Amino acid sequence: MKSVLLIGLGRFGKHVAQQLYDMGHEVMAIDMREERVNDSLPFVTSAQIGDSTNPEFIHSLGVSNFDLCIVAIGNNFQSSLETTSLLKEMGAEKVISRAERGVQEKFLLRNGADEVVYPEKQMAKWTAIRYSSDHILDYIELDNTHAIFEVEVPKSWIGETVGSINIRKKFNINIMAVKSNGKMNMNITPETMLSSSVTLLVLGEYHNIQKCFHI
């Protein structure tokens, strides 16, 4: 369990707060708008109304005591930038800030953010990849070059074993797991048989996965 300071309770911030709550983390939520703070009370540990660009207010939160600080402000980049900088100045251990454009990401990283999330860009990429190919069921980007895909078994592989298709040697792709009826089997051997009733979780460089599965 981690203690998280979440600043900004718009749509993105609210979803983050709810997810952290579901995962069992302690969340202190901050927003300037009273109605947003009140709406968050059922799924945060505590909440305050306040201006995160005010140094005295940020200091009063004891930001160095949190494992993680998330700046989820989405409609005022100046406030997001000032908040990010203040958190780091006040001793925040780790600051994650939201960007809406590429240029914002650069400024946030230069002014104290340890990492930047870009929800619109990331979701746009996920949507394009997920729905432009019928046989892709899910996609997780690990870095700029590597990803995990959940894919249907190609027709030519049905009835074959993992060893016989040998995609690790041919494409440098690893089959991490076989999924059937929502259950994951990670005990993959060369003798594991492939069928149309399962999906595969594969890990590799994106361009290799593109070639192998014709994405």
Image (tube, rainbow, N blue to C red):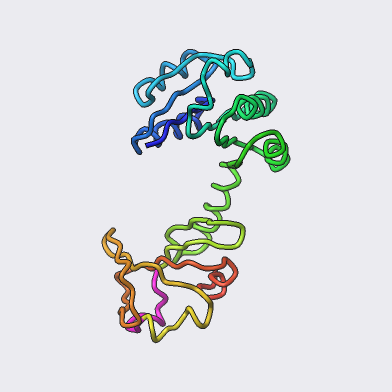
Q: Quadrant of residue 196?
A: bottom left
For the N terminus, the image quarter is top left
Q: Is residue 156 shown in magenta?
A: yes
Residue 166, x across and y down, in percent = 44, 83
Nearer to us in this view, 157 or 69: 69
Q: Is residue 181 above or below residue 104?
A: below
Instruction: Tell me if 166 is positioned left or right of 95 in this view.
Output: left
Q: Quadrant of the C terminus?
A: bottom right
- Classified by dominant secondary structure, the portion drawn in magenta counts as loop
Q: Position of residue 102 (x, y in %)?
A: 70, 43
Vertically, is 176 above or below 169? Answer: above
Question: Which span is picked out in magenta?
Answer: 152-161
Report if residue 200 lies within the magenta region.
no
For image coordinates 36% across by 67% down, the residue present is: 177
User: What residue is rendered at 39% in x and 32% in y?
Assistant: 18
**Residue name at image x 41 percent, y 82 percent:** 156
Against 33, is 165 above or below? below
For the point 50% across and 34% down, the residue is 68
